């Protein structure tokens, strides 16, 4: 069984720091991200066993109270998602490329998970809001049919949420693009 991911977004930096502490103390989760993001929000991302993440998320929702603006609980997340969020995904070769751009952090995490579960692709990066005006994106690579299947699955999830900005597939990227993506 894969771990879970829990996410809380708040409209207050002070409440975000308080909530991070409450979530970390509640159960055996790892806080993998806790920071202020554009435009003046605070986000917390935790991972760990499903039950621990669920308990931690509940503590975050209670601790953040009326400052909570969004949240996500994603059990059994694909093993590539967390490393891609941490930008710790090594890739040697750029094959076909897919990019899904979203309006929210939960939607890009859900899209990344769906894409990775749909086909044999590599998640290269999942970028969460900071420095992007609150937008997010995932970059993935693989063989053309796999990228197309992964993109279809990820885009479908984001469209259901209503958070899709744009999705593009590049079947044969120019070699220079690898300097910027890898």
Image (spheres, helix red, strand yellow):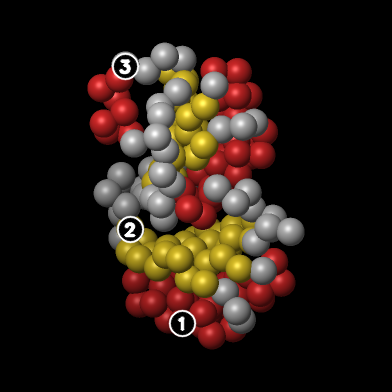
Name the mark nearer the viewer: 3 or 2: 3
As drawn, the label of residue 139 is none
User: In the image, residue 179 lies at what x, y percent?
Assistant: 26, 31
As helix, strand or loop, the secondary structure at mark 3 comes to loop
Which residue in the protein does label 2 denote? Answer: 37
Residue at left 67%, top 69%? 49
As helix, strand or loop, the secondary structure at mark 1 comes to helix
Q: Are marks 1 and 3 in contact (CB under 8 Å)?
A: no
Vertical position of residue 28 compared to residue 43: above or below: below
Measure how far apart labels 3 and 2 are at the Cα level.
32 Å
Of mark 1 and mark 3, the one earlier in the sequence is 1
Which residue in the protein does label 1 denote? Answer: 21
Measure how far apart labels 1 and 2 are at the Cα level.
18 Å
Determine whether, in the image, residue 140 is placed left or right of residue 6: left
Which residue in the protein does label 3 denote? Answer: 174
Vertical position of residue 69 compared to residue 173: above or below: below
Determine whether, in the image, residue 30 is placed left or right of residue 132: right
Q: Are marks 3 and 2 in contact (CB under 8 Å)?
A: no
Residue at left 61%, top 68%? 48
Vertical position of residue 77 compared to residue 164: above or below: below
Of mark 1 and mark 2, the one earlier in the sequence is 1
Q: Is residue 34 visible?
A: yes
Residue at left 53%, top 62%? 7
Vertical position of residue 135 compared to residue 33: above or below: above
């Amino acid at each position: 069984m894969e771990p879970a991911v829990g996410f809380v977004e708040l409209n207050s930096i002070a409440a975000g720091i308080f909530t991070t502490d409450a979530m970390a103390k509640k159960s055996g989760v790892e806080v993998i991200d806790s920071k202020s993001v554009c435009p003046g929000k605070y986000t917390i991302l935790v991972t760990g066993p499903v039950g621990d993440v669920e308990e931690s998320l509940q503590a975050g929702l209670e601790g953040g109270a009326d400052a909570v603006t969004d949240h996500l609980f994603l059990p059994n997340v694909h093993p590539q998602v967390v490393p891609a969020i941490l930008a710790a995904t090594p890739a040697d070769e750029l094959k076909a490329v897919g990019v899904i751009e979203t309006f929210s952090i939960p939607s890009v995490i859900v899209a990344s998970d769906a894409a990775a579960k749909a086909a044999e692709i590599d998640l290269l990066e999942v970028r969460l809001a900071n420095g992007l005006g609150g937008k997010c994106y995932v970059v993935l690579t693989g063989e053309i049919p796999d990228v197309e299947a992964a993109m279809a699955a990820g885009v479908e999830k984001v469209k259901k949420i209503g958070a899709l900005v744009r999705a593009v597939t590049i079947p044969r990227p120019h070699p220079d693009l690898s300097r910027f993506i890898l």
